[in-house]
Amino acid sequence: MRAREFGIEIGSMKPGRLNAITDVEGVGVGHATLIQGDDVRTGVTAIVPHQRNPFEENVTAAVDLFNAYGKATGLPQVMHTGVIETPIMLTDTLNTWLVADAVLDYLRERYGVTPRSLNPVVGETNGGFLNDSFGRHVRKEHVFAAIDRARSAEGMGVVEEGNVGGGTPMTGYGFKGGIGTASRAFGGSTVGVLVQLNCGRREDLTINGVSVGREVEMPPPEGREPGNSIMMIVATDLALTSRQLWKVAKRAVLGLARTGSFGSNGSGDFVIAFSTGERCVDELIESMPEMRRPRLGEGFLNPFYKATAEATEEAIINALFKAETMVGINGNTRYALPLDQVVSIFKRYGRTARARPRPTPP
Amino acid sequence: MRAREFGIEIGSMKPGRLNAITDVEGVGVGHATLIQGDDVRTGVTAIVPHQRNPFEENVTAAVDLFNAYGKATGLPQVMHTGVIETPIMLTDTLNTWLVADAVLDYLRERYGVTPRSLNPVVGETNGGFLNDSFGRHVRKEHVFAAIDRARSAEGMGVVEEGNVGGGTPMTGYGFKGGIGTASRAFGGSTVGVLVQLNCGRREDLTINGVSVGREVEMPPPEGREPGNSIMMIVATDLALTSRQLWKVAKRAVLGLARTGSFGSNGSGDFVIAFSTGERCVDELIESMPEMRRPRLGEGFLNPFYKATAEATEEAIINALFKAETMVGINGNTRYALPLDQVVSIFKRYGRTARARPRPTPP
Amino acid sequence: MRAREFGIEIGSMKPGRLNAITDVEGVGVGHATLIQGDDVRTGVTAIVPHQRNPFEENVTAAVDLFNAYGKATGLPQVMHTGVIETPIMLTDTLNTWLVADAVLDYLRERYGVTPRSLNPVVGETNGGFLNDSFGRHVRKEHVFAAIDRARSAEGMGVVEEGNVGGGTPMTGYGFKGGIGTASRAFGGSTVGVLVQLNCGRREDLTINGVSVGREVEMPPPEGREPGNSIMMIVATDLALTSRQLWKVAKRAVLGLARTGSFGSNGSGDFVIAFSTGERCVDELIESMPEMRRPRLGEGFLNPFYKATAEATEEAIINALFKAETMVGINGNTRYALPLDQVVSIFKRYGRTARARPRPTPP
Amino acid sequence: MRAREFGIEIGSMKPGRLNAITDVEGVGVGHATLIQGDDVRTGVTAIVPHQRNPFEENVTAAVDLFNAYGKATGLPQVMHTGVIETPIMLTDTLNTWLVADAVLDYLRERYGVTPRSLNPVVGETNGGFLNDSFGRHVRKEHVFAAIDRARSAEGMGVVEEGNVGGGTPMTGYGFKGGIGTASRAFGGSTVGVLVQLNCGRREDLTINGVSVGREVEMPPPEGREPGNSIMMIVATDLALTSRQLWKVAKRAVLGLARTGSFGSNGSGDFVIAFSTGERCVDELIESMPEMRRPRLGEGFLNPFYKATAEATEEAIINALFKAETMVGINGNTRYALPLDQVVSIFKRYGRTARARPRPTPP
C-alpha cells in the first residue's frame, strides 16, 4: 500500500489519476531489476519524456544541483542547452558509465540513429550496502529492457515502486528505500515526480510532519552511513522555458526537506526537471481564474512550485511504504519501514492512518 | 513568549545560551524601529559579524540565492571574493539603496575610514502592506543607531524579535511577521540564524510538523499577496571556507521549507552565511568523537547543515510568536498568530504547548 | 575620431549604421556629465532598452558575472526573473546607491508609477583617481537628465564616447578611458555593445592584435592601480530567451580578452545583455541561408556570439580613442592614448592606420 | 617545432623549463594513441596531479563551464566538493563513459583500492571527422597504458603534442589540432596548461595577434563543422582554495579568445583547474616584492590569471604547430597548419618567425 491508501494525505493539492509521474501524458517508466544469488541487488530505471525518439525530439529541461556529491552524467550540457535528448536513466553508482554507454547502443539498435555526439543523462545513488556495486552487473540488455518497457502502454501506466530498477538496493532514512512516485494535477496541467531514494538518517525521518524516525522502536540500522543521495525527476506538460523549469526544479528540495533530510555532505541531491511541452501557458492561465490578472509575471509558476514540493515529499514516503526488507551482500539486511508502528505513531499524534499494514520485522 | 517557551522544540539539537544569532561570539544585532503616525511602520536591523572594524577585518562569507526576486545589494561581490566587509543591514524594499549609501557614511564617521570602494550588504523584504514604503523613511541616523546598537554589550545579548528594525511591517504566512532568531550549539561550536520573515501563505503554515495554517480559524488575511520574501542570515564561529559556507547557507532553505513555504515566485529568498573564524575545524573534530575517523572529507559539516536547518525553522516560528498585531497605512491590519489556537491545535495533534498565550484577535 | 575612422577594422562582421548600441532600434543612451572645480569628475549614463515605460514593458535580459568585484545593483533578480524593468544606469562606484534610489523617483515623476517593488539596475566602475568619489556628486537631477536624454530622438542617435556620463573619470589600460560603443549587423538583426571602460594594465593593451601597450613610449601611468572594472552592456533586437541571452552575454568577455585584460582580481567585469524582442528567430533563420538546415538547434546564436565579441572589443578601443586627457582631484592626470604613436606602431606591424591623429602629450 | 621555437613569444611572462604542464612538479601526462586501418584515429590522455594515489590524496580543484555543450563526467561533484580524486582523462566524445568506467578498474588493479564511490573526471572533444567514433575503440588497456605512462619519470617530462592521445583525431580552426601545452613560471610558482584542441573556424584563427586564418591560402576545410570543443586543464603548485582556483580557471577562456574562438554554440569549452598544493601563498608573496603590501586581499592571484591566459593561448598554438596532416575515416583529410605560410604572414606583419618550417600541403 502507498502512503495515500493509509490515509496520509501530503499537502493540499490533488494527485493525478495514478498519483505517479506517468500522469504527465506520454511519460513512461521502465525498470529492469537484478536480484541474483547473495550479492547482486541492483537494476536500472528508464524514464522517457515521451513515446517518440527523444534524440529527434528533445524536451526542454533544467537541473538543480542541491548537493552535488554524485556522478550523474550529462547535467552540464542540460544546464547550458536547456534540453534532454535521451531517456533519463537511474542506477547504482558504479554502473553509471556503462549505462550511459549502453544508451548510445540503444539509439542505434532501436531507432537506427548513429549519433556523432550524444548526451546521455544517467543519475545514480549508492547501493553498496546490499549490492556488489563494484561488479557493475547492469549491462546493455538491462538498459534496453528498461527503456523498452518505458516505451510501452504498460510503461505509461502504474509505476512499480520500492525495490525495483535503479532503486533495488537503496536505503532511505535507515529503512529500505528505492523508487517512489507521486503527482499533482491542477488547471488542466500535471506535475509528476519520481525519486530514487537513498538518503537520510533514521532519527530525522518525518512523515507528513510526524517525527516517525524518533518514535519508531527498532534496533539502529546497520552500516556507518545507512544510505545517501537522492535523484528527483520532475515532469510537467506545461511548456515552460528552461529557466522556468530550473525554478520548478529547485522546489523539489523543499519536499525533501519536509521528510527530514538536511542534505548530508556525502549526498548527491540532484533534481532534473523536464517539460513535454504539450500544454501552453495561456491555456493554463485561462483555466485558473485567480491567474487572470494584469502584471502576473511568472506568478503562474506558483502552483507548479507547490505541486513539485508536495509530490516530491509524497514520492519519498511512497518509496518507503512500498519497499520491502532486503538481505544482500555479506548478509547485510535493510529493514522496511514498520508500517504497523507508523499507524500507531500517527494515531498518537492525532492523525489518521488506516488499515492493517506490514508488521515490524521481528 | 518564544516558541520554545511554549514547549515547541524544533529538531533534536540543543540551542545556544540565548537561542539567538548572538550566541556566536562577537556577533551583534541592533534595530532601529520607526513607527510614526498612521503610515510609517519601518526600520532597519544591523548585524555585525564581530565588534571590530569589519572593513579592516573582513569575515569569510557566502550567499545562496534560492529565489532571487529581491533587491539585496552586495551579493555578487560576496559570491566572488568570499568575504563581507560591512555590517549586514536588513530593511524595507525601497529603503535598500539609501541604507547602503548610509553605511558608507558610517565608516567615515565612526571608524574614520574613507574607502574608495565599498560593498555594503543590505537585504530587504517588502513591507508595503503596512508601511509607506515609497516614502523611504529610514535615513542615515537610523542606520547609525542600528549599527551602534549592534556594536555594544546590549547588541551582543538578547535579540529583540517581531515588529522591530527591518522586520517592523512584515508579514509571515498571512500573520504578522518580522524578525526572529534561534541557534544551535554542538562540539564547542555554534550556528546562529536571524530571519526577517515576510513570506508564505496562511494555509501553508506548518509549525513543527503541524499544519497550523489549515486549522486556524480566522478570516483570511487582507491583501492579495500577504507577504513575500525572507532574508536568512547564518552565522558560525567555525573557520569554514567560503565554499563550505555556501553549502551551509543552502541548508537554511530546508528549515524554511518545513514551515510551509514553497518559495513563491515573487519572493526573495536569500541566505547570507558568514563565519567569525574564531574556532578551527581541527578543534571541532577533536571534540566530537564520531568525527575522529579516516577519510572524513567534509563530513564534519553535517552537524552544521542540520543546525542551520533547525535554527532557521525555529527563527521563523519565533518571528511569528513574537510579532504583535499591527495597524498601518490605509488602516491595513495584520493580525498576530493566535497563540491560544496554536495551543489547542497542538493539543489536538498530541503535542505539548504549554501556557496561556496571546488570544486570537476578536 | 573612432577606431574605424583610423582604418582599424576589428573582426570581420559589418557594423550597423552608427556603429553604436543605438543601432538596435529603440535603444537610447543619455549621459549627464559633471566636471566642476578641481575634483568633481563624474556623471551618469542611462541606457533605455526601448522608448516606452520599461516598468510596464520589461525586456528579456541576462547577466554574466566574470569577476564580480563590483557593486552593481539589481543583478540577482535579473538572473532569476530574466527581465529588466528599469533603465540601465552606469556611474562611479560610490554613487551607485543614490543613483538606484533616484530611478525610483524617476518612475513616479516621469511615468506616474509608484511601484511597491522595483529592481533598478545600476553598474559602476571606480573613478577615484580623478574624482572625489566619496563626495557622491551625482544626484537625482543628473539621473533624470540622463534618462530623459536617452528617451529622446537624440538619445537614439549618435552616442557620445570617452569622458562622458558614467565614464567621465575612468581609466583604461593606464590611459584615459570611459564610454565606448560599437555594433554589428547581420541577417537583418543587430547586436550593439556599450562599455564603461576602467580596467587593464598599460603593458597589456592590445589593439586589433597589436601590442600597443608594450610599444608606446610614455612615462608609466600614475596611481598604483590605474583603473579597474568594466561594465559591458549588450543589446539585440532578436527575441532570445534569457538563457540564450546569458550565453550571448558570456561572449563579451572574449572581446575584452582580445584587448589585453586578464580580469584583474579587483576588477568588476560584468556583462548585462538584453533583447528588445523586435525580431523573431524564424525571420533570422529565413534570412540567413546557411541557417536553413535540419537539427540546427541553437546554431543561429553563433553570429550573435561573434558579433558580441567583436563589438565589445571595438567598443573598448573606441573608448580609448575618444577619451581625452583629464586632470582631476589632487592634480592627478590621466593621459589619453597617443594616437600618433598608435599610427606609427600600426605601420611598423603592417597595419593601416590612416590620418593625422591626436599627438602624444608632451 | 613549437611556436616559441619559431620566435613566436606569446605574452610577457616566462615559460617554465619545459614550457609544459609538467613544469608543475609531480604532474604527469601520458598518452595512448590508436591509429589502425583506415578509420581508427583515436586515443586517450591521462593527466595525474601527482605521482601518488589520487584517490587517497585528493587535490583541490575547480571547474569553469564556459559553454557546456560537452559530455565530460565528474564535474558537478568537483564543483561542490572542490577536489579531484582520479587522474583527469581526455578522449573522443563517444569513448567518454567507457574511459570513466575503466578508471574504476585502474584503481583496483594498480592501487588495490575497491572504492564504493568514485568520481572519475573525463573530458572529451569530438573526433568524428577522422575517427570511427561510434566504434568506441579506446578500451581498458589504453586507459591503463595512458595512466601508467603519466605515472612515470617520462610522464613527468616533455609532453608529446599534436596527434596523440585524446587529441589524435581533433581539428583546430579548420586545421589539424590535438594536444598542446605551455607554462609560465614566476615568484617560484608555476602555472601549466594542457589543451585538447578541437574548436574554431579557420577564418578566425589568430596567432599572437595576427589574423593568420584570414591570410592563409588553402582550400576551405572539409566538413560542415570542422571541429568543435576544447578541454583546458590548468595546473599550479600554489595552495589555492577551490574558489580561488575557480577564478583562475575562468582565465583560460581569455587565452582561448585571443586565438580567435567565439565559443561556438555546439562547442564544449570546459576548464578544469587543480593545485598540487606544494607551495603556500605566504612564500609566494614573500618572493614577489610588489606583493608585500597591506590590504592585498587576493591580489596575488593576478599573476596566476595572466599566466593562465598566456599559457592557454600558447598551448593552443602549440597544438596547431605540432599536429600533422591526417587522413582518416571515409578518406577524410585534415591538413596541418602550413607553417611556411605562417612565417611569411608573420613577416608581412612585422613579426619574427624564424626557420624553414613544414610546407603547405600541395
Image (tube, coloured by chain):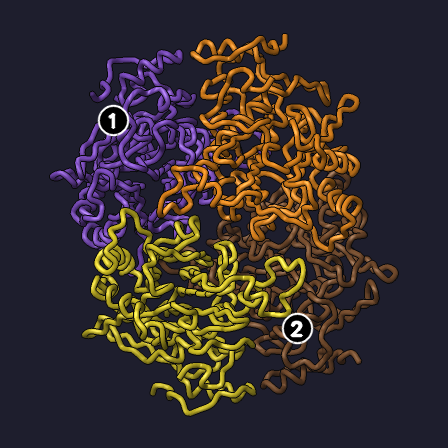
Chain colours: A purple, B orange, C brown, D yellow
Quadrant holding the C terminus of chain A? top left
Q: Secondary structure at mark 2?
A: helix
| Numbered circle sitting on residue A336 | 1
Q: Chain of mark 1?
A: A
Looking at numbered disc 1 in the image, what kind of residue is underneath it?
Ala
**Residue B142 x/y as whole percent:** 76, 34
Q: CA distance from mark 2 to mark 1?
A: 69 Å
Image: B102 above or below D82? above
Drawn side of residue D362 relative to residue D315, left or right: left
Percent x, y of residue D31? 29, 70
Which of labels 2 and 1 is toward the front? Answer: 1
State the residue at coordinates (79%, 36%). Answer: B141
Residue D98: in sight, yes or no? no
Label 2 Cα crowd, 10 Å radius (few <14 / some 14-19 / many 20+): many
Q: Chain of mark 2?
A: C
The crowding category of the residue bearing disc 1, from other C-alpha atoms within 10 Å (few below 14, some 14 to 19, many at least 20), is many
Q: Are marks 2 and 1 in contact (CB under 8 Å)?
A: no
What is the quadrant of residue B202 in the picture? top right
Give the residue type at disc 2.
Answer: Arg
Q: Write down the residue under mark 2.
A: C202
Residue C152 is tagged as none
